[in-house]
Image (cartoon, grey):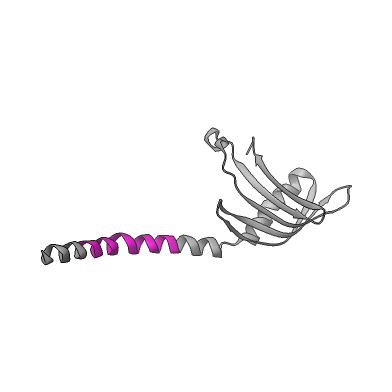
Amino acid sequence: MSESASESRGSRSRLVRWLGIPLAAVLLTLFFVYLGFPYDRMTRYDLRGVDQNQGLQVLVGSASPSVAWLGPGIALRDVVIVPSNNPRIHLDRVELRPAWSFSWFRAVPAVHASIEAPSGDIDATVQLENP
C-alpha cells in the first residue's frame, strides 16, 4: 500500500515538473514583457496620428502600465490637449484598457477610459466603430 502512495506522489511531482515549471516560465515571461514594454514610445507614435487627423496637439508627461482586476491597460499622466483655437485642456491622469463588451464579437473594439482632471472625473466606455 505504501508503494502505490509513493508512486502517486512520484507521478504527481513529475506532472508538476512537466506542466508547472513551463507554465510558470511562460507567465513570468509575459509579466516581465508587460512591465518592460516601451509605453512611452508607443504613446508618442499613437499620438502623432491624433495630431495629424484631429488637428490638435496632445502632450503626455509619462506613460506606464496599469493593472486592474478588469484587465491590463495603459496609464497616462499629466496630459495636455491643445486644440488649434481653444484653451488648453489639462488632465491629471488618463487610464485606458479594453472594455468588457459584447461589441468585440461584432469586431467593434471597445475601450474603457478613466479620466481624472482638476474639474472632475470621467469614467466612460467608447466603442470604436471604424478602427
Q: Is residue 82 left or right of residue 125?
A: right
Residue at 64% x, 35% y: name it.
129
Bounds of the magenta span? Answer: 11-28
Q: Quadrant of the N terminus?
A: bottom left
Residue at 62% x, 60% y: name it.
39
Q: Quadrant of the C terminus?
A: top right
Q: Which quadrant holds residue 61?
A: bottom right
Q: Nearer the viewer, residue 53 or 100?
A: 100
Residue at 86% x, 48% y: name it.
84
Q: Is residue 119 left or right of residue 38?
A: right
Q: Which quadrant holds residue 14?
A: bottom left
User: Could you tell me residue 91's position as x and y percent?
Assistant: 77, 56
Vertically, is 43 above or below 124? below
For residue 17: magenta? Answer: yes
User: Could you tell me residue 110's position as x and y percent?
Assistant: 61, 41
Vertically, is 10 above or below 56? below
For residue 95: magenta? Answer: no
